[in-house]
Amino acid sequence: MIFGGGKPVDFGKTLSDGGRIFGSHKTFRGLIGGLAVGGIVGLIESYVFSINLLPIAIPASVGALVGDLGGAFLKRRMHIEPGGALPGVDQLDFVIGALLLVSVFSPVSLAVVVIMLLVTPPIHFLTNVGAYALGLKAHYW
């Protein structure tokens, strides 16, 4: 949302169902911005907690972005327009992507998975409501 706009990741291409691959809301600027913010947050957390978290922060960022693209792909196949809601997928696609990619590089405990799956949806919802209230989003979801 913050870094959006620009060239779409799917270059405007469609599949045999006539729908875009990811849609107009998934852009290279957003991907690069998401990766940059993930890396910066990893650096800040590394400093705050005195431990190098970049080996986890970078895969988590990439995984979250890939998970989000997967959610967009699914929504386009279901003919849900960009910005349209798909409850559950909208709140968890990026979390699942991040957890899966991080698990390749570092063990992820069941407790972490459960906490992430329980904590993320309300945080996601509240940040979207805040962005909507500030006029940054067209919908509260």
Image (tube, rainbow, N blue to C red):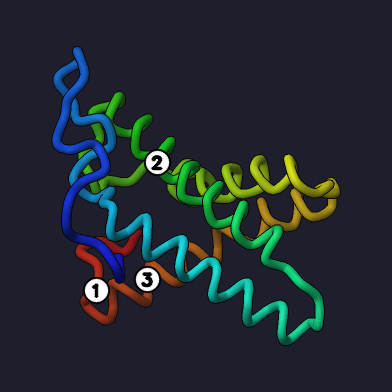
The quadrant in which residue 68 appears is top left
Mark 2 nearby-residue class (10 Å; few <14, some 14–19, many ≥20): many
Write down the residue under mark 2: 69
Write down the residue under mark 1: 136
| Up-down relation of residue 56 to residue 134 (above or below) | above
Separation of marks 2 and 1 at Cα, in angstroms: 21 Å
Type of amino acid under label 1: Leu
Q: Is residue 41 left or right of residue 113?
A: left
The quadrant in which residue 115 appears is bottom right
Q: Earlier in the sequence, mark 1 or mark 3?
A: 3
SS for callout 3: helix
Mark 1 nearby-residue class (10 Å; few <14, some 14–19, many ≥20): some
Q: Nearer the viewer, residue 140 or 107?
A: 107
| Up-down relation of residue 38 to residue 24 (above or below) | below
Picture coordinates of residue 52 (x, y %)?
Answer: 76, 72
Q: Residue at x 63, y 82 (%)?
A: 44
Q: Nearer the viewer, residue 47 or 95?
A: 47
Q: Residue at x 26, y 43 (%)?
A: 9
Image marks 1 and 3: residues in contact by CB distance under 8 Å: no
Image marks 3 and 2: residues in contact by CB distance under 8 Å: no
Picture coordinates of residue 92 (x, y %)?
Answer: 54, 47
Write down the residue under mark 3: 129
Type of amino acid under label 2: Leu
Residue at the extreme top of the image, as rendered: 16
| Up-down relation of residue 79 to residue 25 (above or below) | above
SS for callout 2: helix
Type of amino acid under label 3: Val
Q: Residue at x 56, y 47 (%)?
A: 63
Separation of marks 1 and 3 at Cα, in angstroms: 10 Å
Which marked residue is nearer to the observer: mark 2 or mark 1?
2
